[in-house]
Image (spheres, rainbow, N blue to C red):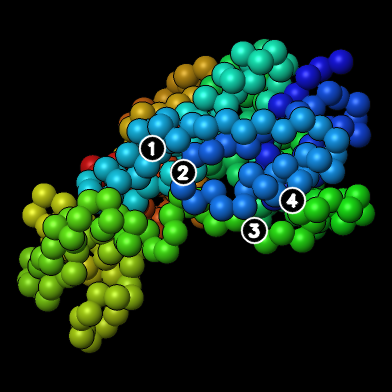
């Protein structure tokens, strides 16, 4: 009988994940991660689910790793005028890094989570695929998982919709059946700017100039951490036509704005690219997502850039460009960077 460790957040997804695997006859235990000081009731709720299922519950503390890798990257990205996705860094290094290693050390055969994604093996390679539920699909934030990681994890909810998961939880009487969705940035209480100001100090939000794309000064911004590419609201400008953030210039503490048509880009420069299987011959035809909820756009992928068939709005440094084939399989991805 295979031994499986379940990452338990106390929410409905991980609870149903554990319920399904137990029903399939696997030996399972649950594990909750202490990553930061915003855990609140997660440990208590996860233990309640484990007690309900009659399984052992572990609590592992990875606060230091989380702080030094995920939080540090989050802060440094904003200081560098990038807009990061901390879930991507956490999945690669903590959930499927430190926790997976812990599972292996304890003798478990697999690590399972409540992520909405699928893994299929073909031609000796593990391939990450979008979930059946397009709205819940999390393949975008899992694209950096290696072949070793993909071969060691299970995503039992990949073929299910969120509605189906809720129904299973309710029918089984699982304690977290009606628990609300967790927030995306789990380590932040309040706004991300409040968090950054607390960590960095007010000096990191010093006012600076706002220019149009011709170099004309239009006004003052309140600090670069308050803005992201494509942003329209909160600029404090009075203009004839709406303007949007086109560029965030950290070196000169300046914001560049322009009309809507100027937020579109034909290309996206990428770095630290990961390939799901073997490195391909370039260019590669793919469908590319530049944010988790972005509609995949047809493009050609090169070693260090993506060239879209049609210009895309708000290509944002710090986010990831994730490449899919025409059958919803992830073929690779990398971090978007300023050209």
Of the numbered discs 3 and 1, the one sitting upstream in the chain is 1
The alpha-carbon separation of the residues under discs 2 and 1 comes to 8 Å
Residue in view at x 59 percent, y 40 percent: 139
Residue in view at x 62 percent, y 52 percent: 41
Q: Which SS class for mark 2?
A: loop
Q: Are marks 3 and 1 in contact (CB under 8 Å)?
A: no
Of the numbered discs 2 and 4, the one sitting upstream in the chain is 4
Q: Are marks 2 and 1 in contact (CB under 8 Å)?
A: yes
Residue 12 is labelled as 4
The alpha-carbon separation of the residues under discs 1 and 4 comes to 26 Å
The alpha-carbon separation of the residues under discs 3 and 1 comes to 23 Å
In this figure, which residue is indicated by the disc labeled 3? 181
Left/right placement of residue 62 relative to residue 304 reads: right
In this figure, which residue is indicated by the disc labeled 1? 67
Q: Is residue 111 above or below residue 108?
A: below
Residue in view at x 12 percent, y 76 percent: 219
Left/right placement of residue 48 relative to residue 307 reads: right
Q: Which SS class for mark 1?
A: helix
Which x, y percent locates residue 286?
Answer: 52, 38
Which x, y percent locates residue 148?
Answer: 59, 17
Left/right placement of residue 201 relative to residue 57 reads: left
Of the numbered discs 2 and 3, the one sitting upstream in the chain is 2
Q: Residues within 10 Å of mark 4 (few under 14, many from 20)?
A: many
Of the numbered discs 3 and 4, the one sitting upstream in the chain is 4
């Amino acid at each position: 009988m295979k031994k499986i460790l379940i990452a338990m957040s106390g929410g409905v997804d991980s609870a149903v994940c554990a319920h399904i695997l137990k029903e399939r006859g696997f030996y399972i235990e649950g594990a909750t991660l202490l990553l930061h000081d915003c855990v609140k009731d997660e440990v208590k709720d996860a233990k309640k689910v484990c007690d309900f299922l009659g399984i052992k519950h572990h609590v592992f503390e990875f606060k230091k790793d989380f702080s030094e890798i995920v939080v540090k990257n989050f802060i440094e990205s904003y200081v560098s005028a990038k807009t990061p996705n901390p879930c991507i860094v956490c999945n690669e290094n903590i959930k499927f890094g430190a926790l997976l290693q812990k599972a292996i050390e304890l003798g478990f055969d697999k690590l399972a989570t409540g992520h909405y994604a699928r893994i299929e093996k073909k031609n000796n390679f593990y391939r990450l695929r979008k979930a059946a539920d397009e709205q819940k699909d999390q393949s975008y934030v899992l694209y950096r998982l290696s072949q070793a990681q993909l071969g060691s994890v299970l995503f039992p909810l990949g073929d299910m919709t969120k509605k189906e998961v809720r129904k299973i939880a309710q029918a089984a009487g699982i304690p977290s059946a009606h628990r609300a969705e967790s927030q995306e940035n789990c380590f932040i209480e309040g706004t991300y700017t409040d968090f950054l100001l607390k960590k960095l100090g007010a000096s990191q939000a010093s006012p600076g100039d706002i220019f149009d794309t011709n170099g004309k000064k239009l006004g003052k911004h309140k600090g670069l951490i308050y803005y992201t590419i494509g942003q329209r609201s909160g600029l404090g400008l009075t203009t004839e036509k709406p303007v949007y953030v086109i560029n965030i210039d950290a070196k000169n503490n300046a914001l560049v704005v322009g009309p809507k048509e100027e937020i579109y880009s034909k290309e996206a420069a990428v770095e630290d690219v990961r390939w799901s299987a073997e490195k391909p011959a370039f260019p590669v035809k793919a469908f590319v997502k530049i944010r988790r909820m972005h509609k995949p756009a047809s493009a050609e992928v090169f070693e260090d850039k993506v060239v879209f068939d049609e210009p895309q709005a708000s290509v944002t440094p710090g986010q990831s460009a994730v490449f899919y084939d025409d059958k919803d399989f992830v073929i690779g991805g990398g971090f978007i960077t300023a050209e």
